[in-house]
Amino acid sequence: MGCRNRTPSGHNTTVTLTDDQIHEALSSILEHRDRDAPGTVLGAGSDDLGAGLRYLGALVDGGWMVPTWPVEHGGRGATDDEARRISAALGDYGSADLYPYGVGLSLVGPVLRDRGTPEQQDRWLRPIADGSEIWCQMFSEPDAGSDLSNVGTKAVRDGDGWVLTGSKVWTSRGAYSKWGMCLARTDPSLPKHRGLTMFAVDMHDPGIEVRPLVQVNGDRHFTEVFVSEVRVPDAHRIGDLGGGWGITIETLAHERESLGGRVFGGSDGEDGALPGWLAALADSGRLDDPVARDLAMRAFVLGRVNRLTIVRAAATARGGRPGPEGSGTKLRSVAAFKDRAYLVKDLSGAAGMLEDSSGHLAFLTAPSMSIRGGTDEVQRNIVGERVLGLPPEPRVDKGIPYSEIRKGR
Ligand SMILES: Cc1cc2nc3c(=O)[nH]c(=O)nc-3n(C[C@H](O)[C@H](O)[C@H](O)COP(=O)(O)OP(=O)(O)OC[C@H]3O[C@@H](n4cnc5c(N)ncnc54)[C@H](O)[C@@H]3O)c2cc1C
């Protein structure tokens, strides 16, 4: 392992490692991956907090989970190139389902790293990296989903803090989070995108009520959250007053990158091995049928092309914050996952009607992939407007103060 140096910015960093050195270090703390072990899909069917906590605990001292973060915050001050090599190397070792920790690690952490005050970074980043504090994302509301800037939860100034009141919905991980990254309206007299501010809300405050929502796949980590006069110190405001929309866009870009930049449900058969889902179909004899074989190969090729596109995009990326391209990545990953999940179900015959049949959980989880992190339609709008430069959608409430916009109820 590298010895610690100081960068000109004052952050601790470590000497850049070769791939062999990375593997040597990781193999001393992790087991090699069992390639036949089934992968999980964004926590579907499991809320095992303990496994993730142990995994993050093993990685945090070496800064392996969040390599680009400073050493003092649970990273190792790595360059983007070294971080990519570490991430690839981690794929060779057994891991835990990190779904419960995903908002902190992939959304809030990068935003705090780039936008947080030094005090916020000192307070929140290390507990995210070691898994001791879980975060949830409190953006969506009954009247604010695709049209997220319509958020109505209000934050009213009160001395050196704020009082938040409103309700959030579809808050994944709400039941076991310590902190919520909460978008609230601080100035209703401004047009809707401009009067918003981001806060960190203590989910253990007595004014927070979390009610579980059970999904069709049986998961219970989905919640609605009622916020009743919750006091938040101004020191827990993330970013500038009125700058909440910019923070939101950045957070969602990180979310799309993290949703798109992976192959859901385990390996798609890298290293020439047959992916598990395809091997299972072949073993069942379903692929003896030429039409089924053709459909299976199409799904396999779509998944493989998607993965290679992600690898190519990562190799040409210039670092920095993710942009609208992440919407295309998310669209491709979701399409590949759904295609495969539906095909496996279609080809399972009568056995596919059983709840414990192979691929059943993925089949029930698949539709949600097109909604979470922004719907497919919204991703296409983003690609159309911000990547292809097509004319924007008509926006009838543009420039009108939020308080004067006609509401549905
Ligand atoms: C599994 C899951 C987990 C989630 N986790 C979280 C979370 O942790 N935190 C959080 O804040 N939110 C979360 N969400 C909420 C998610 O972000 C919203 O559901 C999503 O943004 C869509 O909003 P909506 O449900 O209000 O649908 P609407 O916005 O009401 O959309 C309804 C339909 O209209 C279409 N539509 C809307 N506007 C347009 C447009 N301009 N152009 C074309 N079509 C349009 C949509 O594509 C959709 O098909 C989660 C959702 C799911 C399914």
Image: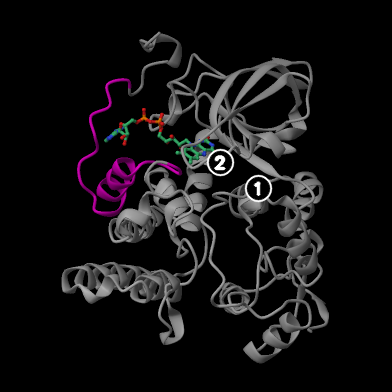
CA neighbours of label 1 inside 10 A, class few (<14), some (14 to 19), many (20+) = some
Residue 79 versus residue 57 in the image, above or below: below
The secondary element bearing badge 1 is classed as loop
Q: Look at the image and tell me in which quarter the N terminus lies.
A: bottom right
Asked if the magenta segment contains residue 375, the reply would be yes
Q: Quick check: can you spot residue 114?
A: no
Q: Are marks 1 and 2 in contact (CB under 8 Å)?
A: yes
Could you say which is closer to the camera, residue 115 or residue 201? 201
Q: Which residue is mark 1?
A: 47
Q: Which residue is mark 2?
A: 219
In percent of width and height, residue 387 lies at: 29, 54
Kind of residue indicated by mark 2: Asp
Q: Quadrant of residue 181?
A: top right
Labels 1 and 2: the sequence-earlier one? 1
* Residue farthest toward the left in the current orientation of the protein: 291
CA neighbours of label 2 inside 10 A, class few (<14), some (14 to 19), many (20+) = some
Q: Quadrant of residue 346?
A: bottom left
